[in-house]
Amino acid sequence: MPAKDKFNAAVMKLQHEMWKNKLITFLNGGPAPTNTSHKDCALGKWMYQEGGMSEYGTLPEMKSLERQHTQFHDTVRKAIDLHSAGDQDAAWKLYESLKPMSAEIMRIIDVFNTKINR
């Protein structure tokens, strides 16, 4: 099955929004999110295990998506580490920085989805 057929923009966007929810739950005293790598979420699995990068890796949108997506997950991990080390203020600031990052990821997903489904 081509990678195009495995890419569901709505599911990818929903799954990614859930990462912000997992982090805010943790920052408010809930369990720490696990599998925070950019390769372990639905989008990462599509990119690295289901052919997304091999099929579309040369597209500028894919390069941008990979960069933004990696940065997003790196920021999630840093916020978890800071909170775990007792620096709640810095962790919350990182959480706030995820909002524009997430919006950009959503925008890129939409552009990418339109491009591959023409």
Image (spheres, rainbow, N blue to C red):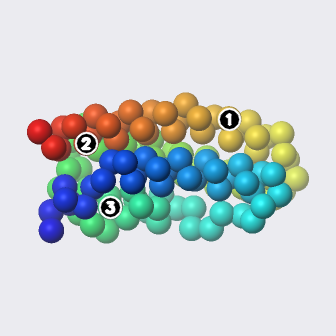
Disc 3 to disc 2: CB gap under 8 Å: no
Which residue in the protein does label 1 denote? 96
Q: Compare marks 2 and 1 and give the one earlier in the sequence.
A: 1
Q: Residues within 10 Å of mark 3 (few under 14, many from 20)?
A: many
Query: Can residue 51 be seen from the camera position used here?
Result: yes
Q: Quadrant of residue 22?
A: bottom right
Disc 2 and disc 1: Cα gap in Å? 27 Å
Residue placed under numbered mark 3 in the picture: 46
Could you tell me which residue is drawn at 32 percent across and 61 percent down?
A: 46
Residue 43 to residue 13: above or below: below
x then y, percent, for residue 73: 55, 52
Nearer the observer, 11 or 32: 11
Q: Residues within 10 Å of mark 1 (few under 14, many from 20)?
A: few
Residue at x-position 15% and y-position 63%: 2
The picture places residue 21, in percent across and down from the top left corner, at 64, 50
Q: Amino acid at mark 3?
A: Trp
Q: Is residue 117 above or below residue 37?
A: above
Q: Secondary structure at mark 3?
A: helix
- Residue 100 coordinates in the image, percent (x, y): 55, 31
Label annotation for residue 113: 2
Q: Earlier in the sequence, mark 1 or mark 3?
A: 3
